[in-house]
Amino acid sequence: MELKTRALQESDWETMQLWWKAWGWPEVTKDLMPLEGLGGLIIEKHGKSIASGFLYLTNAKVAWTEWIVSDPEYREDDRVDALKLLVQGLEDVAVSQGYKIILSVGRNKGLLKVHKELGYTVDDNPSYEISKKIA
């Protein structure tokens, strides 16, 4: 497989901002991200970034994956494989650090399918993201 996983770098931030904007997501600032925007992984193929995501590590044995996004212009057949590699990579980091449960929230049907294929429980009942900007 030509897909490669690596840790996020400062130079990836602008790429992720472009992807989030293209998908219609709100602007996100680094101070809302784990490790100031470096707490995650990115998947590449031949040096081209394909997908990225973040891993929030809590003070309990619960980790949280979030802000999983892919290049909206990437059209190759291995997009799903890239997302699987990303989700599995984030899980592997959590496991290596002793976490016992990993959570995520999502609505993208393709990403939900990826999680199901990797053995995650995906509740059939819809739930809602609940957030409030407090500062």
Image: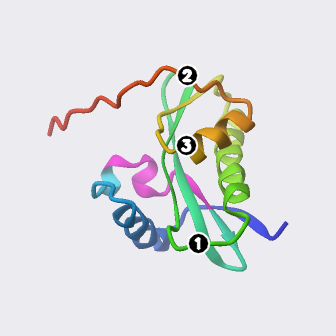
Q: Quadrant of residue 116?
A: top right
Whole-percent x and y of residue 4?
A: 74, 65
- Magenta region, residue range: 32-42
Asked which secondary structure carries label 1, the reply is loop
The amino acid sitting under disc 3 is Lys
Q: Of tags 1 and 3, which is closer to the observer?
A: 3
Q: Whole-Å distance between the Cαs marked 2 and 3?
A: 13 Å
The residue labelled by disc 1 is 74
Label 3 neighbourhood size at 10 Å, few (<14), some (14-19), many (20+)?
A: few
- What numbered label is drawn on residue 109? 3
Mark 1 vs 3, N-terminal side:
1
- What numbered label is drawn on residue 123? 2
The front one of 133 and 118 is 118
The amino acid sitting under disc 1 is Tyr
Q: Which residue is drawn at the image coordinates 34% and 56% (left, top)?
A: 30
Whole-percent x and y of residue 16?
A: 44, 65
